[in-house]
Amino acid sequence: MMETLRTTEGTEFMFQTQAPLAAAAYHKKVADHHEDPRNVGSLDKNPKNVGAGLVGAPACRDVMKLQTEVDDNGKIVDAGFKTFGCGSAIASRSLAVEWVKGKTVGALAIKNTDIAKERCLPPVKLHCSMLAEVAMKAALADYRVKQQKK
């Protein structure tokens, strides 16, 4: 079955949905977040304290939207994500969002290598953790732009 995702900029990503791989194909750390992803969902994009990042690798049909809500003290109080991708992609994004909650914008230093190490990702799946890092940076950049417009 073909699905379409349209970005806020109007770019469309077409992808074919597939049946999920058997949980046994994943490392147990990936299977945990793949089977029970945390913080899936969207935040209201309009408030000035919510930043959004939308990134993707259309060649592998891997797309992620990540949003952060920041309080007046610069602390990330909420975050959510939506993604299209494999179990490693879902697990990487779920973990990244879990890690950012409670961190301050200025002290946030989540790296794809840390995500990959924690999830025991093989080299062929490093793009999954990379997109999580890039989406987080994009969401925080969007937040900073909104703050400058205040």
Image: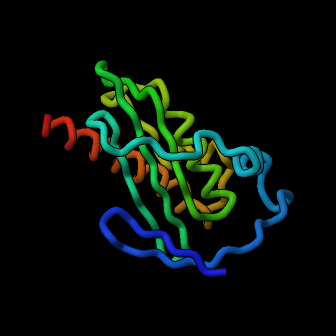
- Residue at the far top in the pictured view: 73
Quarter of the image for the C terminus: give it.
top left
Q: Quadrant of residue 50?
A: top left
Residue that appears at 49% across and 51% down: 132
Number of labels in the image equals: 0
In-front residue for pair 127/85? 85
- Above-or-below relation of 11 to 84: below
Quarter of the image for the N terminus: give it.
bottom right
Please state the horizontal and vertical placement of residue 129, each as a whole percent of the image.
54, 53
Please state the horizontal and vertical placement of residue 11, each as a whole percent of the image.
36, 73
- Above-or-below relation of 74 to 51: above
Please state the horizontal and vertical placement of residue 47, each as a whole percent of the image.
30, 37
Please state the horizontal and vertical placement of residue 2, each as a whole percent of the image.
61, 80
Residue that appears at 37% across and 24% down: 75
Residue that appears at 30% across and 66% down: 9
In-front residue for pair 8/131? 8
- Above-or-below relation of 133 to 102: below
Residue that appears at 39% across and 33% down: 69
In-front residue for pair 44/91? 44
Visual colour scheme? rainbow
